[in-house]
Amino acid sequence: MLVLGVGLLVMPNLVFSIFGIEETNEVWIRTTGLLLLGYGAYYWIAVRAGLTSIYRASVWVRWGIALGLTVLALTTGPWQLVIFAAGDLLGGSWTFFALRSADQPSAA
């Protein structure tokens, strides 16, 4: 999230070219990069503080974002939004299973 945030804030058209998205000079993409940096900072702090509750909440949020991005890709947005949806779906699922295995008592 931090890396994508920096990319969209500093060089959005390079990030867009990687995903085959048309170049833009709109301020909104840089705004999105700034927001991603902020959210990434929250996650960074949560990791350092051991706050698993934010990760539990993030599973549902990321699955919801994946659904929303897919709907946008199928209706009004570029198809490449599905790539970002897949990233959120996989990331949220990975977090879900990691938290679930951490909740299991060890066999020792």
Image (cartoon, rainbow, N blue to C red):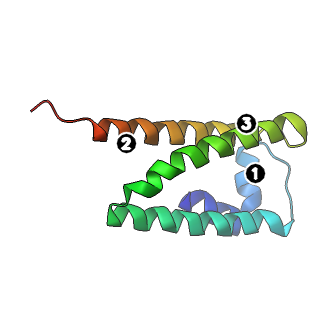
- Does the rendering let one see residue 8? yes
Q: In the shown orientation, is residue 3 left or right of residue 84?
A: left
Quadrant hosting residue 25: bottom right
Label placed on residue 75: none
Instruction: Identify residue for label 1.
Output: 16
> Mark 3 or 1 closer to N-term?
1
Q: Secondary structure at mark 3?
A: helix
Q: Residue 92 at what x, y percent from top left?
A: 52, 41
Quadrant hosting residue 48: bottom left
| Residue located at (84% from left, 41% from top) | 78
Dots 3 and 2: beta carbons under 8 Å?
A: no
| Residue located at (78% from left, 42% from top) | 20
Label 3 is placed on what type of residue?
Val
Across the whole image, how many numbered discs are drawn on residues?
Answer: 3
Q: Residue 87 at what x, y percent from top left?
A: 60, 40
Q: Residues within 10 Å of mark 2 (few under 14, many from 20)?
A: some
Instruction: Identify residue for label 3.
Output: 82
Instruction: Identify residue for label 2.
Output: 99
> Gap between marks 1 and 2, in whole Å?
32 Å
> Mark 3 or 2 closer to N-term?
3
Q: Residues within 10 Å of mark 3 (few under 14, many from 20)?
A: many
> Gap between marks 3 and 1, in whole Å?
14 Å
Q: Residues within 10 Å of mark 1 (few under 14, many from 20)?
A: some
Q: Residue furthest top?
A: 107
| Residue located at (41% from left, 63% from top) | 46
Instruction: Classify 54 as above or below 67.
Output: below
